[in-house]
Image: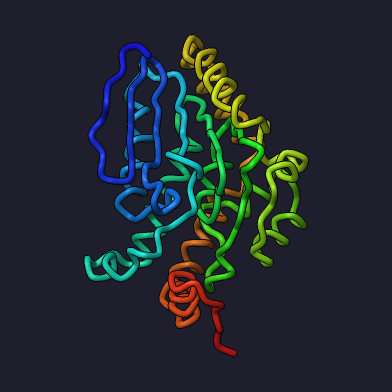
Amino acid sequence: MSNVEQTTAPTGLRVVHDGRVLRVTIANPKRKNAINYDTMVALGDAFEAVVEDRTVRAIVLTGEGEDFCTGADLSGVVSEAQRGITPEMTMDAANRLVKAIVDAPVPVIARIRGAAAGVGVALALAADLTYASEDAYLLLAFINIGLMPDGGAAAMIAAAAGRPLAAEMALLGERLPIADAVRHGLVTGVLSAEELDAKVEAAAAKLSTGPRRALELTKSALNAASLTSLDAALAAEKTGQSELLQSPDFMEGATAMLTKRKAVFAE
C-alpha cells in the first residue's frame, strides 16, 4: 500500500487513509464486531469527514476477523445508561451513521464475511457496492430480544427485494443465507473467501481514479431513485425503538442472549 495514514479512533474502530481510498474497519473481533455507542459516533464522524476530504474517491467498510458486524454490543447497555446515554441518543447515533454512509459523496464498498446482523445489516445495505463471501449471512435478530429493526434495514430490504422478504426477516428473526440475499438483489456479489479481497480491491482501485464530482452525482441520483422512504423509516424507528429499549421485554431478551438461554417474554 502507498500513502497510508492511520487515523486516531476509539477502541473498536480503525480508520486508514490509503491514497484515495479510506479504509474503515470495525475492530472488535472478540465480540464479533458488535458496536457500542462510542463506535457508532466515531463511524459517523469518519464517513461525514469525507465531505471535506476531497482526496478520497472510495470508502471500504469491513469488519476485522471472521464477521462483518453483529449489531449493537449488548454487553455495554448498563454502562452506557450509567453514563447518561439515553435510548434516543443511541438511535440518533445509529441513524446518523446510516445516513452518513448513504450520503457519503463517494461510493462505499462493504466487504462482508460471516455475520451481518442487527444494525450490521443496515451498514451492509447502506453501502453502494456490497460484496460478500460464501459463508456470510444477513440476520435481523431484533425481534428475538424484544426490539424492532433499525438503521433503516427493513426499508432498504423492502426497496430492493420487496415487502414479503422484509417482513419475513423482521418478524421471524431468522438468518438469510448470502446466496438468497444475492438472488433477491440485496448484495452486489458473492465470492469465495479467496476471491473476496481481490474483488473489493479491484473495485476500490477503479473508483480511486474516478472523477469525484461525477461519482457524487451518480450516487445521489441512484439513492434518490431507490431510497425514497429511508428518512421516514429512520424517524419511525427512532420513536418505536426508543420505547422498546426501555421495555421489560428488551431487558429480558438482552439478558437471555448474554446468558445464552431462551427469552421468556411477557404475555
Report whether 52 appears left or right of 240: left
Closer-to-camera residue (176/235): 176
Quarter that holds the N terminus: top left
- In this rendering, is residue 243 above or below 216? below
Residue drawn at 27 percent across, 26 percent down: 6
Residue drawn at 33 percent across, 41 percent down: 13
Q: Quadrant of residue 267?
A: bottom right
- In this rendering, is residue 117 above or below 112? below
Residue 251: x and y, percent? Answer: 43, 77
- In this rendering, is residue 54 above or below 84? above
Number of dots carrying numbers: 0
Closer-to-camera residue (177/205): 177
Residue 261: x and y, percent? Answer: 52, 76
Residue 23: x and y, percent? Answer: 40, 28
Residue situated furthest bottom in the rendering: 267
Q: Quadrant of residue 112?
A: top right
Report whether 22 appears left or right of 116: left
Closer-to-camera residue (12/50): 12
Report whether 85 appears left or right of 133: left
Residue drawn at 31 percent across, 13 percent down: 3
Residue 77: x and y, percent? Answer: 34, 67
